[in-house]
Image: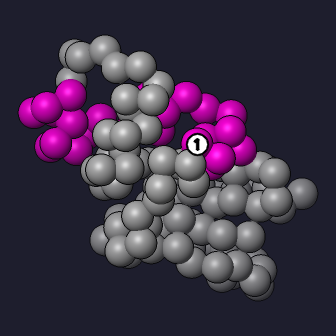
Amino acid sequence: MKIYHNPQCSKSRAGLKYLKNKNISFEIVEYLKNPLTEKQLETLLAKLNKKPSEIVRTQEEYYKKNLKGKNFKDHEWIRILVQNPRLIRRPIIEKDYKAVIGDLSENIDLLLK
């Protein structure tokens, strides 16, 4: 199991704490320090069963100034997210062939069943 984590994000810290409290072994991937490749993000999106635009943090300043109101194709969103990893919703928890956005503990529980 992996958690794609941003230590500056309260939701990401909460997801990490939730996993720790469950006594589950997992790997922490600080994706701002170790950015995802386009291929890794594509794989993660497939496990999430989401389109790239569905994991964009629209409250980020970069989004508001540069992307809001524009239409991008999936491959363009992937490139944008890889180049601007702060735009990726977090935390993302990945296990085997599935992943969830762990901003809610209920989502994390779906992976733990």
Name the image quarter holding the C terminus: bottom right
Q: Nearer the viewer, residue 105 or 64?
A: 64
In the image, what residue type sits under mark 1?
Glu
- In the figure, is residue 16 to the left or right of 63? right
Q: How far across and how far down the image is residue 85, in percent?
A: 34, 54
Which residue position holds label 1?
42
Seen at 31% across and 15% down, the residue is 71
Q: Is residue 86 above or below residue 28?
A: above
Q: What segment carries the magenta color?
A: 42-67
The residue sitting at the right extreme is: 113
Dividing the picture into quadrants, the one containing residue 8 is: bottom left
Q: Is residue 92 visible?
A: yes
Q: Is residue 103 above or below residue 80?
A: below
Q: How far across and how far down the image is residue 70, in percent?
A: 24, 17
Seen at 48% across and 48% down, the residue is 38
Q: Is residue 56 magenta?
A: yes
